[in-house]
Amino acid sequence: QVQLVQSGGGLVQSGGSLRLSCAASGSIFSSDTMGWYRQAPGKQRELVADITSSTTNYADSVKGRFAISRDSGKNTVYLQMNSLTPEDTAVYYCRVQLWRVWSSQDYWGQGTQVTVSS
């Protein structure tokens, strides 16, 4: 069982920055995908960014502002969020996708609130 513990959310002013962290327990390989999703009230959960090995993927809305990275030694994925706007306000969830021979499994963090004031 993989467990994900998130930290780093909070309240910031428009134009500010936050850094989210997600520490995973269990066996995570570089070939597994670690990523961040977000969900605002009344909206579907959407992909923000993910990383598989060294390959990154970003939502168009955050390209150039957010950066995802991972520390394999610490089994931790980070999301550096810069130039935040109120449109970034949401609950942010860490997600790990395990790719195994006979299965693919999803694990989710508890979520953390990011609120950006105008």
Image (cartoon, rainbow, N blue to C red):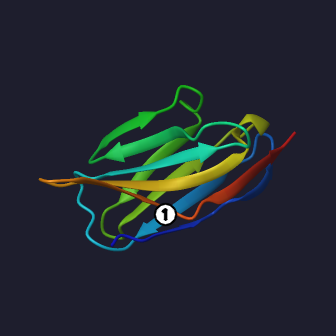
Location of residue 29 with respect to 25 vertically, above or below = above
Q: Mark 1 is on which residue type?
A: Cys
Residue 47 in the image, given as x and y percentages of width and height: 50, 39
Q: Quadrant of the N terminus?
A: bottom left
Answer few, some or many: residues within 10 Å of disc 1's Cα (few below 14, many 20 plus, some between 14 and 19).
many
| Image quarter of residue 76 | bottom left
Q: Position of residue 24 (x, y in %)?
A: 40, 69
Q: Is residue 88 left or right of residue 30?
A: right
* Residue 95 located left or right of residue 20: left
The residue depicted at 61 percent of the width and 37 percent of the height is 44
Q: Residue at the far left: name it.
A: 101
Residue toward you, 26 or 107: 107
How many numbered marks, from 0 up? Answer: 1
Write the residue at 60% across / 56% down.
19
Depicted 56 relative to depicted 69: above or below: above
In the image, 8: left or right of 108? right
The residue to which callout 1 is attached is 22
Instruction: Residue at 80%, 41% (x, y): give it.
Output: 14
Most foreground residue, 13 or 101: 101
